[in-house]
Amino acid sequence: HPFSITSAPSDDYLSLHIRTLGDWTSQLKTVFSE
C-alpha cells in the first residue's frame, strides 16, 4: 500500500506520504514535483 495518512485526526489538514512503487505513483510524484 503506497499511501499513508500521516496527519492526526485533530489536525485541520490532511497529510499523506506516498511511496513510489509503480508507474502510477511515479507519475503522481512527477506531477507534484513540478
Image (cartoon, rainbow, N blue to C red):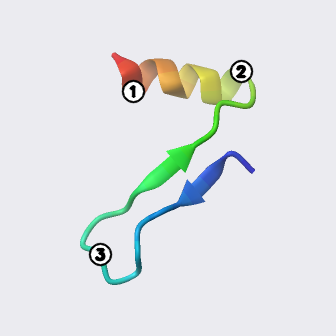
Can you give x and y, in whole percent of width and height, for residue 5 in the image? Answer: 52, 62
Of labels 2 and 1, earlier in sequence is 2
Q: Is residue 4 above or below residue 9?
A: above
Residue for badge 1: 32
Residue 24 vs 11, above or below: the answer is above
**Separation of disc 2 and disc 1 at Cα?**
14 Å
Rendering coords of residue 12 (x, y %): 24, 72
Q: CA distance from mark 3 to mark 2?
A: 31 Å
**Looking at the image, is mark 3 or mark 2 nearer the viewer?**
3
SS for callout 2: helix
Residue type, mark 2 in image? Asp
The location of residue 10, given as percent across then percent down, is 32, 83
Determine the secondary structure under disc 1.
Answer: helix
> How many circles with numbers are drawn on the protein?
3
Q: Amino acid at mark 3?
A: Asp
Residue at which label 3 appears = 11
Quadrant where the image shows the C terminus: top left
State yes or no: discs 3 and 2 in contact (Cβ < 8 Å): no
Q: Nearer the viewer, mark 3 or mark 1?
A: 3
Q: CA distance from mark 3 to mark 1?
A: 22 Å
Residue in the image at 59% along x and 57% along y: 4
* Nearest to N terminus: mark 3 or mark 2: 3
In this rendering, position of residue 30 left or right of residue 11: right
In the image, which disc is placed on residue 23? 2
Q: Residue at x 43, y 21 (%)?
A: 31
How far across and down, in percent of the image, does residue 18 sit? 57, 42
